[in-house]
């Protein structure tokens, strides 16, 4: 019943200046609306659709950018890890380690992430049922780390499309762990553009609101000042200048939802 | 942007007294919360899972019950039609004719319903995409009847399960017609109990709230004072005594949603 | 373990001459390959995607065409029924009454079809699991008619696409009734062309062969000498001049499958 | 149009004796039926449902077992790789490196596997469309390795179930690479037993035959002399003593299919 946490940032880290600009704007918007804020950015895009996708910063430079955001803006930061060897150094900077959906069953990665002692946010695989996340969480719990978050990011629905089952939110909530709604990846159309993923960013607020009305701990959103020229996930990122209004509206729904919790 | 309409009643009509009792309670709850109310009850269950299902009242007795509700409680009433021959007599009593999801592509039925001049509420088939409803609406429009409503009631998702795609609400809204969320059938598990459909009524408020937060014209819910002993759809009907609280909460979300409309 | 039955013909009946031409060619091909043959053609297309679809012959003229095929070519004939009132007159001409997939749960229609005493071939709804067909069959059995056939025609898989689950064939076979594979509708893309259904006829032999290798009683295929100019289902009908080769190949697979039955 | 390749072995490597016993029996059966044979066994199960699953041999011991099979039985061997660091040492022993379905989009793993020069067999992710595999193959091609195989192992279909779309076989064939049908994992029910995956081994022959009738380069099957006591995937592995009969039947279907190729 704590106020909504907003996990947001660009899909892919670009420069320290760019990251700080985005983090600063979002921090301001979250402060104004009463939301908690966590900055997110990726140092690697390990599973891009195409081999020709724009290259990412890499681990070392990426962590430096994340560190600069943490220090300059004073907000917690998170990024996604893809190999067990990355977990320790990422945990030195990041407050939350994010496990990508495709990798949510990789035991060694989950254990390495859990062993750092940092919070671990696992995205539910597009191929999993919400109740299957109990077994995923148990792999992290085996490291005596119970600082776990579970993120809904849609489930496979035919070819090149995801659907979000709102029932999955309270289903995952049965684990007792905070549930996050990823509002931008759920509107992606995986592989839908041939050599890249498509998306329909205009539907991201639909997903965010629906989930917040049900009652979630947080919302994950990717944003960019110029999505169409961003190095990745352009079609589903939200325009940065629309974020303050969206966050403000979500906080109103969050207040109403948390005053009227649904019991499952 | 008008306040939410609540279309609600028992799955299957039982007696005039029973129907009036339910309609009376729901009218009172809707009045208190500022919602519009429409009573719904079926005179026939033409597509029950099993041949052994409880028999229904039939057309003549069912219409008499609906008429008694309309006169005694003073609310609009609706019921579902299954054969084109039923439309004219149903339209003499009912303000809205409901087309069942399985029948939403039957041209003759849609045209017969449209020709009565009554409002026609078509449930989206479990096998259709939201954009396919444009062609469904066009069949009714061919009768010069533009008093059309489109209802989301879930789409097939593997076997014996439905999922609601929240994106379908604004997608159907593109037709310009009011969109209704069926919050109880969407949590049914078709065929999930062998000789009957299963369901998880505890998730109905999840569906209702999610949809209302996005912004819909109405919510459809089936309710009963004793769902476990109701002649049909027990597993997903909502307890009657929980309806006033649910309607009140939905109206708060509706107010917030309509003050902050999503533009698609 | 009887040789394969081929149920085939144009989607929509056109003229008696046209129907007899197609039936004659297919009868010849089936005789040559050792298959049983049943002619199929529709007198009405009650659930076309769009209101603007080409009109059909209607019941009376359609039955006259079917009768002419039966008499002139000497083969059993089948057509689909959409309203309970049609069953008796259709059964006077047709050996098999076909229940459309969307209508496979309509109790009154199933009972009316069963009561004629003719064989009843029910297409599995795109929204049903194979084991749900037991309840469908029971509705026909309630009329003391056990001359039932169950047809696989694909299940909803996301939007505007069907998938055939080959496991459904032996699953439906557990009822003890003959199982038919509809090889052409399964490759349709429902609603996929906006105002009409799309399809990929080149995949029809993939579906037919797969099913025959598993072991089925029959294969259903729609065919036309000029599919692209046929009044319906053009995109998934097979060219008539390719049918003899296809039937011949299927019979070879059928012989192998029935000599090596799969036990489930 | 070469005869079918059978890729088969136990899910998880146990001992050298056990592996050689299985490889020996399968080699004999394949020789008798005219099939090519490749032994498969896993040294690690990196994505088991539960943390409590039986431990695997690990890389070093596993490779020793694979080497012993290769030398003692004289057959090519394959195993699955999970981390890019494993590829080089695995390629010293194995003729084919298998990429697990969950990892089929991990660029670094695909490039590491491709760079070894060994053949790379990628299982299609449960979340991918068949046409998406073109981009997957391109990641391997970027290493100048065109010795690629693509394996169908089912696509997500609702919760806890997969479905095989037979159309995916010729769709993937459009890449020009050999297509393999995984007949045992496709009948698994992921997560379907709570802490383990369920399965229905009786349906594996259904999948194998269906695919072979369409025309594939190979069939992948897991087998064990005592599946119910095997360390993993028991519910969907085929009894070893049923393999010779199954392989023999598949070769008959393969001969028929390759004499009558389907052109897409």
Image: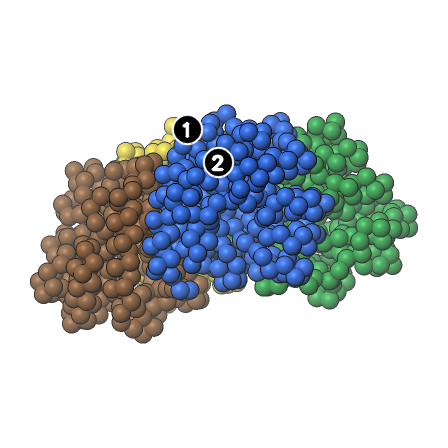
Chain colours: A yellow, B green, C blue, D brown
Q: Is residue C122 left or right of A75 when viewed as pictured?
A: right
Above or below, comparing residue D188 to residue B38 in the picture: below
Q: What element does badge 2 sit on?
A: helix
Question: Is residue B228 in sight in this rendering?
Answer: yes
Which quarter of the rendering shows the N terminus of chain A?
bottom right
Distance of mark 1 from mark 2, alpha carbons?
Answer: 59 Å
Q: What element does badge 1 sit on?
A: helix
Local packing at callout 2 (Cα closer than 10 Å; few below 14, some 14-19, many 20+) is some
* Along the viewing direction, whichever of A41 and D65 lies nearer the viewer: D65
What x and y, as percent, mark residue A264? Answer: 60, 61
Name which residue lies at 29% across and 61% down: D246
* Along the viewing direction, whichever of B75 and A205 lies nearer the viewer: B75
What x and y, as percent, mark residue D6? Answer: 23, 56
Name which residue lies at 11% across and 54% down: D92
Local packing at callout 1 (Cα closer than 10 Å; few below 14, some 14-19, many 20+) is some
What x and y, as percent, mark residue B104? Answer: 65, 41
Q: Chain of mark 1?
A: A
Nearer the camera: disc 1 or disc 2: 2
Above or below, comparing residue C232 to residue C93 in the picture: above
Asked whether the residues under the numbered discs 1 and 2 touch, taking CB atoms below 8 Å apart as contact, a structural biologist would say no
Above or below, comparing residue D158 to residue D176 in the picture: below
Name which residue lies at 77% across and 41% down: B85
Report the residue that reaches farthest toward the right. Answer: B72
What x and y, as percent, mark residue B132? Answer: 58, 35
Residue under pointer 2: C24
* Along the viewing direction, whichever of D110 and C8 lies nearer the viewer: C8
* Along the viewing direction, whichever of D100 and D2 lies nearer the viewer: D2
Q: Is residue B117 left or right of A162 when viewed as pictured?
A: right
Residue under pointer 1: A228
Q: Chain of mark 2?
A: C
């Amino acid at each position: 019943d704590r106020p909504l946490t907003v996990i947001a940032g660009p899909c892919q880290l670009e420069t320290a200046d760019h990251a700080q600009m985005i983090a600063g704007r979002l921090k301001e918007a979250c402060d104004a609306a009463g939301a908690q804020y966590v900055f997110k950015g990726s140092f690697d895009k390990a599973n891009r659709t195409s081999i020709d996708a724009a290259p990412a910063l890499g681990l070392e430079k990426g962590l430096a950018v994340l560190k600069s955001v943490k220090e300059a803006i004073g907000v917690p930061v998170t990024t996604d890890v893809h190999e067990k060897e990355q977990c320790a150094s990422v945990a030195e900077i990041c407050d939350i380690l994010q496990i990508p959906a495709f990798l949510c069953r990789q035991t060694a990665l989950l254990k390495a992430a859990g062993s750092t002692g940092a919070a671990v946010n696992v995205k539910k695989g597009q191929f999993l049922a919400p109740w299957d996340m109990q077994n995923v969480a148990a792999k992290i719990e085996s490291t005596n780390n119970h600082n776990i978050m579970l993120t809904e990011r849609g489930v496979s629905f035919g070819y090149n499309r995801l659907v979000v089952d709102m029932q999955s939110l309270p289903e995952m909530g049965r684990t007792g762990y905070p549930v996050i709604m990823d509002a931008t990846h759920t509107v992606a159309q995986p592989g839908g553009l041939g050599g890249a993923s498509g998306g329909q960013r205009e539907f991201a607020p639909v997903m965010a609101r629906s989930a917040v009305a049900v009652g979630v701990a947080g919302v994950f959103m990717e944003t960019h000042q110029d999505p169409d020229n961003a190095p990745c996930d352009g079609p589903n990122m939200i325009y940065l200048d629309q974020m303050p209004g969206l966050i403000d509206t979500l906080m109103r729904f969050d207040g109403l939802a948390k005053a009227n919790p649904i019991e499952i």
